[in-house]
């Protein structure tokens, strides 16, 4: 699913965001990335989304080599990703339902099923009653949940969620974490960044990546088969 | 493809939103495009009417052959036969003094009383020769070779002048088409680029979600098409009103000038304006959306 070999990301101003990252993530795996602000969590997700390209090293996401000269193929690859952006990136002037639907309009989803998937995703994040509300009328927490609904409605192979619980209360945050984690059962790879370590400390299963100063420390936890 | 069909309603609604978001600039662009197309419609109408008039004049071209005095009926008849045998000559008719006098009376109308000042009929008989204008040169040369001809009156200089005017109109028409094309393309592509800039956040989000470029561009293409088509309709309405009014005035003032029917001119010009506006709208929009990268 994801393979990174000696990947570094150095911005034009010389800032080293990621240094010699080596990573192997399988389909259906759930990955939690933690670390302090500015540690490189968002930079890693940007690399996986093709919003940035490795300065050095080799990165492959869902069989797509991530290189600048492959921008066209990378855009096509993004159709298999369900992204949750830190700043939501919802389209203003549209309702919550329209935003979720818009994320699916160009995918290989049967047109008849799109509205059903969109409504189902809004129900999953507890926002079915806000389906016809304009997104600018929603609170931050609600907007965040619409962004999550847009990602999961797409039936993606890979969910990339950047601080998806940042604006939610603890109960809602736990629910969203559990909801995202549940997609691994459908063989979807889920990668979540968070600085709220208390939300994942109790998790018994998954890959836990701690980033500090652009370097990764990886820990795998597995539930023993009884 | 099935998604494009499914999304047609969405594309139209997005195009409407784009028009509404920048309502004032879009309204001003529509008015500018309408006026530009109106100028083109004026030139095309003039072109169309001129061509028709020249065509009629050419088809009805005739020359008058005055023969020497004192010719017998037999000589005149022989002369007419010789003229008929020339290639490019159509009908050949004898116009006697009385017919000549009567025609001039008709032409002068209310002023015909001036002819009463003459004691005798001042007009001479002549032979009226219908000719093919394209062969006028050779016909005139052959006529000059015939005996018993005193004087030939042709309208060549008038027709040549009209032809010159038509070629000037053609050049003006082509220049107008080129100017309208370039200015419309510039206006439309500028508006589309402005729209793309104003909606850059939404466009970037769609790119990050993996939307194909055609999905992002389609509403902008429709917006450009709407701008020019509405401008084309405005120009068509203006030319419809102007030609109907203008025809009424011209027909009253100079009824003897042959004109094509107003309906046929309006139909041709409106068709051209609508088709051209549609094509320019699409091409202008394509120029506007061009060079949007994958990043």
Image (tube, coloured by chain):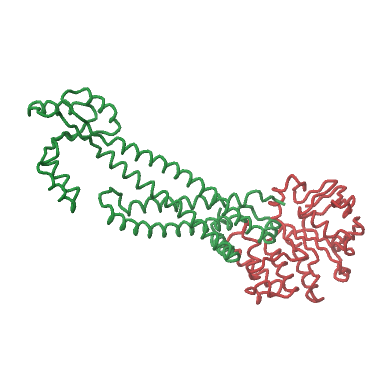
How far from the left and from the top, in percent, is residue A219? Answer: 90, 59
How far from the left and from the top, in percent, is residue A3? Answer: 82, 50
How far from the left and from the top, in percent, is residue B229? Answer: 48, 57
Quarter occupied by the C terminus of chain A: bottom right
On screen, residue B198 versus residue B124, left or right, reads right
Name above or below for residue A118 compared with residue A3.
Answer: below
Numbered label tally: 0
On screen, residue A184 versus residue B86, left or right, reads right
Instruction: Tell me where residue B60 sits by quadrant.
Output: top left
Instruction: Tell me where residue A212 sits by quadrant.
Output: bottom right
Front residue of B36 and B137: B137
How far from the left and from the top, in percent, is residue A7? Answer: 86, 49
Question: Furthest-left residue in view?
Answer: B73
Front residue of B61 and A159: B61
* Chain A colour as displayed: red
Residue found 22% across the figure and 31% down from its top: B152
Name above or below for residue B131 compared with residue B188.
Answer: above
Residue found 42% across the figure and 57% down from its top: B236
Front residue of A112 and A100: A100
Chain letter of the green region: B
On screen, residue B285 versus residue A7, left or right, reads left
């Amino acid at each position: 699913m994801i393979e990174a070999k000696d990947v570094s990301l150095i911005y034009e101003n010389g800032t080293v965001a990621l240094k010699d990252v080596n990573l192997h993530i399988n389909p259906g795996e759930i990955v939690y990335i933690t670390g302090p602000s500015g540690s490189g969590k968002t930079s890693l997700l940007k690399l996986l989304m093709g919003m940035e390209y490795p300065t050095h090293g080799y990165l492959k996401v869902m069989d797509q080599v991530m290189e600048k000269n492959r921008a066209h193929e990378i855009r096509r690859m993004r159709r298999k990703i369900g992204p949750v952006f830190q700043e939501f990136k919802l389209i203003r002037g549209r309702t919550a339902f329209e935003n979720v639907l818009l994320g699916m309009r160009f995918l290989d989803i049967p047109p008849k099923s799109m509205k059903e998937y969109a409504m189902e995703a809004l129900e999953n994040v507890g926002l079915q009653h806000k389906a016809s509300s304009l997104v600018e009328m929603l609170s931050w927490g609600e907007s965040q949940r619409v962004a999550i609904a847009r990602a999961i409605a797409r039936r993606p192979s890979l969910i990339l969620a950047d601080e998806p619980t940042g604006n939610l209360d603890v109960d809602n945050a736990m629910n969203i974490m559990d909801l995202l984690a549940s997609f691994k059962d459908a063989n979807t790879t889920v990668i979540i960044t968070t600085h709220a370590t208390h939300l994942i400390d109790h998790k018994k299963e998954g890959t836990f990546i701690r980033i500090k100063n652009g370097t990764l420390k990886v820990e795998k936890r597995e539930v023993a088969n009884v | 493809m099935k998604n494009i069909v499914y999304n047609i309603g969405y594309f139209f609604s997005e195009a409407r939103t784009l028009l509404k978001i920048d309502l004032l600039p879009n309204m001003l662009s529509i008015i500018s495009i309408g006026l530009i197309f109106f100028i083109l419609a004026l030139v095309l109408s003039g072109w169309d009417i001129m061509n028709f008039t020249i065509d009629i004049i050419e088809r009805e071209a005739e020359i008058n052959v005055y023969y020497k005095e004192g010719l017998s009926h037999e000589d005149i008849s022989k002369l007419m036969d010789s003229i008929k045998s020339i290639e490019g000559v159509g009908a050949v008719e004898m116009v006697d003094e009385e017919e000549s006098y009567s025609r001039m009376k008709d032409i002068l109308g209310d002023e015909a009383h001036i002819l009463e000042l003459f004691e005798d009929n001042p007009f001479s008989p002549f032979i009226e020769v219908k000719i093919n204008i394209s062969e006028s040169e050779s016909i005139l040369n052959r006529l000059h070779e015939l005996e018993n001809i005193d004087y030939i009156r042709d309208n060549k200089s008038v027709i040549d002048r009209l032809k010159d005017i038509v070629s000037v109109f053609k050049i003006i028409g082509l220049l107008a088409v080129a100017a309208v094309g370039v200015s419309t393309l510039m206006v439309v592509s500028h508006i589309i680029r402005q729209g793309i800039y104003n909606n850059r956040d939404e466009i970037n989000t769609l790119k990050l979600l993996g939307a194909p470029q055609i999905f992002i561009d389609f509403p902008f293409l429709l917006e450009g098409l709407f701008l020019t088509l509405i401008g084309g309709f405005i120009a068509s309405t203006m030319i419809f009103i102007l030609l109907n009014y203008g025809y009424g005035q011209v027909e009253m003032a100079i009824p003897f000038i042959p004109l094509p029917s107003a309906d046929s001119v309006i139909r041709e010009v409106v068709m051209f304006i609508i088709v051209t506006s549609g094509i320019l709208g699409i091409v202008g929009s394509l120029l506007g959306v061009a060079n949007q990268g994958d990043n």
